[in-house]
Image: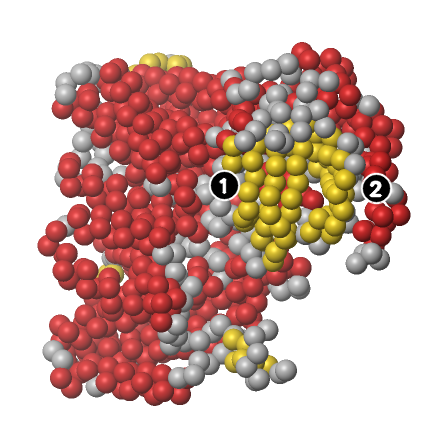
Amino acid sequence: MSLLSVQSLTAHYGDMQALYGVDFGIDAGQVAAVIGPNGAGKTTLMRAMLGAGARTAGRIEFAGQPILGLPPEAIAALGIAMVPEGRRLFASLSVEENLRMGESAGRKGVWTLARVFDLFPILKERRHRPATALSGGQQQMVAVGRALMTNPKILLCDELSLGLSPLVVEDIYALFPAILAEGMALVIVEQDVGRALKVATSVTCLMEGRVVLQGAPGDLSVDRIAQAYFGAAA
Amino acid sequence: MGATISRSGPHGPKIALAGAAVVLILAALPAFADRATLRLATEMAGYLTLAVMWNLLAGYAGVMSIGQQVFVGLGGYAFFVVAGLWGVPVFAALPLAGAFAAFIALPIALILFRLNGAYFAVATWVVAEIAALVIAQTYAVGGGAGMSLPTQVAKSLGNNDQRSALIWWLALALCCIAAGLAYLWMRSPRGLALMAMRDDEIAAAGLGVSTTRNRIMVYLIATFITGIAGAILFLVKLRISPSAAFDVNEWTASIIFIVVIGGLGYLEGPLLGVLLFFALRALLAGFGPWYLIALGALAIATMLFAPGGLWGLIHRRFGWEIFPVRRRVILTNGETP
Amino acid sequence: MTEFLNLLAQGATIGGLYALFAAGLSIVFGILRLVNLAHGDMIILGAFTGHVVATAMGLGFIPALIIAPLLMGAFGYALQRLLLNRLIGKDILPPLLVTFGLSMMIQNALLLVFTADTQKIALGGIETASVPLLPGVAVGSYALIVLAVAVVVIGGLHLLLMRTALGRTFRATADDAETARQLGVRTPHVFGLATALALAACGIAGVMLAVWTSFTPLAGSTRLLIAFEVIVIGGIGSIWGTLLGGILLGLAQAIGGWINPEWQMLAGHIAFLAVLVLMPGGLFAQGRR
């Protein structure tokens, strides 16, 4: 049984359907990459796992418990956290206060303020600055740290590298082993397919709300992914 | 496959005929109703006019004012000054009263329209308080005690029966004009723009809809009509005072409840709301505060469970529409789009 | 000259009362982005609650000052969870209309229970005593007590917002409620606590008002307008600004009343409009504390 499994998930925004029967699963210690062009439904899928966003139907099970329909705060308390696209830091809170908001989930674990500061020493230095006064990369560290502070079993990362310089992205991805070492599962949504394939243990490619390709990165050739992307195989 | 866009429902001509018949019957009211009934009917027409205008502002233009009493009061006072003190004939004094209200509304709009919704609402109330305080300090119009309409003005409208009939016709005519204006405005391109900005101001602005200019225009129309309605309502009473003229409960709270319970954002809503409001008032008048508690609770329940009000429920259940302002796509070969 | 100085002293000290009126409105707007049109009636409800505890039950002023905010806070929490939470959204019309209806219900319920008679809490002479500041210039002792209570309440709110986990959650929820929920914040509960806090502040404001002057069930709308003017003058979203705004409004009224006793309220309204006209920029910079 997977840690998290999604079965025949559909999602609607008003009259517009965003997902058509998506299946997806992940186990502890794995990194699942969700790739696909803009508008394929990647973010919708992620937000559905958090109980947010579109109107959804189907089945989502987390550690054997159905969670579809639970409010986001209940899902957060069960152990799913997200690093949202665009970071969405709290503008009137300092760096430290932003991180401490992760304590709201009420989950004790290895990730404490001190541990996050070990991971991102620069944040400790700037802990009293307003979070939005930091550079883009540092803000992304706050967003990751804030999600880690909820001590999740699954961490969802939406477009981590968006708007960041390649060097900064490199730094952030370099932290993955330290995060995975704690037995966490990671779901990453990435535009940068090459980067996603490098770290992922499984890849799901979405196109127009449907899964068009799923498997281990070793089994999927770049050609097949390109075909899935550009629809040549269909 | 083709399609045409139509606003009138299948029964458009029949409804127009029925409406004309109702107005004609109402116009003949003085032939068989006594003075007290006429007075009540006049009051109802006045409230309906105010409600139609408030609905136009809040339900269609997204302008939430809780200070409309300022224009009722200013219209009433302007009428008493123009007709009572200056001796201008009643029929000329009424539009002048409306014009005065709209004239005062322009600077108010220019200052307050920069505020976002909730601030605008409370600020309009503050403006009404200012107007009431200033009028109470103006001794030419009687200060805090107010003034009576000189008897020669009342007499210029004939004897008691003639006057009651005449004022009723004026109130009915104004009510028809208000409903007609609101209907035509909502069917015009500007009206469509208004609805677009009510639904999504930023998107409408992105499409080049000038939200502020359209809002100011509709605000001026609404205040003009509201001012005339105020003049007629105080012409009935023959007496005006700051506390009565600028009463937030009478001229705004009641009107809001009429619109909300009847159906915010439906032209038919205020009509239903006025009937219900006066029925409740007649039934519950003996119960004092209970009546207003019930009204408040009814309005809250309406907002929570049926935001479209009574007419919204009827419209959804039966698809009825007296004033079709929504455009509908009619497919000529019967296929679904 | 001493007459003018006296007026200024009075104007400044009534600012404390006005700041108390505004504190609850400022909390509700700051955290829930909602203007509570029943706010003035909540203050009057607080005044009646205090009056019942202090006079009808005979427990006196201090117990009233403790019990009224507690009861009002509990009422606020229930009101938010049961009614107002259903209205939180992008459309501003439903919360405005519902709180307007609530205002009418509270006013008339108070009329039903307490009639339209004026009420007052007597404090054994302190309310009429005064303290000399300069030769010939004095302020009321009770006005100074109110000012001190206002400073304590506003200082306490500031500490709560800036120094506690709950305050941090309030600010985060005000910034971005959706993201806060995804981190595990139970926003309906948090909104309930915010309204509880706001109505507790109304309870304190009501009890202080009940000693200051006599009141009736219909006295709320004036207090709503004052509270609203205070938060606009003092700068929206600034908790210390409510104290400053209260004092400025009190001074404007005192100066207006000095020119002509009938102009006291008018001067306050006009000062508010002047701020709106001259500093509209301040109005749009909402919510950042």
Residue shown at 66%/64% (left/top)?
B208
Alpha carbons under labels 2 and 1: distance apart:
34 Å
Q: What kind of residue is marked 1?
A: Gly
Q: State the image coordinates of residue C29 (x, y, percent, origin top left).
A: 47, 37
Q: Secondary structure at mark 1?
A: loop
Q: Label 2, on which residue?
A: A220
The chain containing the residue under callout 2 comes to A
Q: Which residue is mark 1?
A: A69
Residue B178 is situated, as x and y percent measured from the top left of the image, at: 39, 73
Q: Position of residue B159 (x, y in %)?
A: 15, 81
Q: Is residue B48 left or right of residue C173?
A: left
**Quadrant housing the N terminus of chain B:** bottom right
Residue at 39%, 41% in the rendered image: C84
In the rendered image, which quarter is residue A2 located in? top right
Q: Determine crowd level at label 1: few under 14, some 14-19, many 20+ residues with C-alpha closer than 10 A.
A: some
Question: What amino acid is at disc 2?
Answer: Leu
Question: Which residue sits at x=52%, y=21%?
Answer: A106
Instruction: Examine the rendering and report whether any part of residue C281 can be seen.
Output: no
Q: Position of residue B180 (x, y in %)?
A: 41, 77
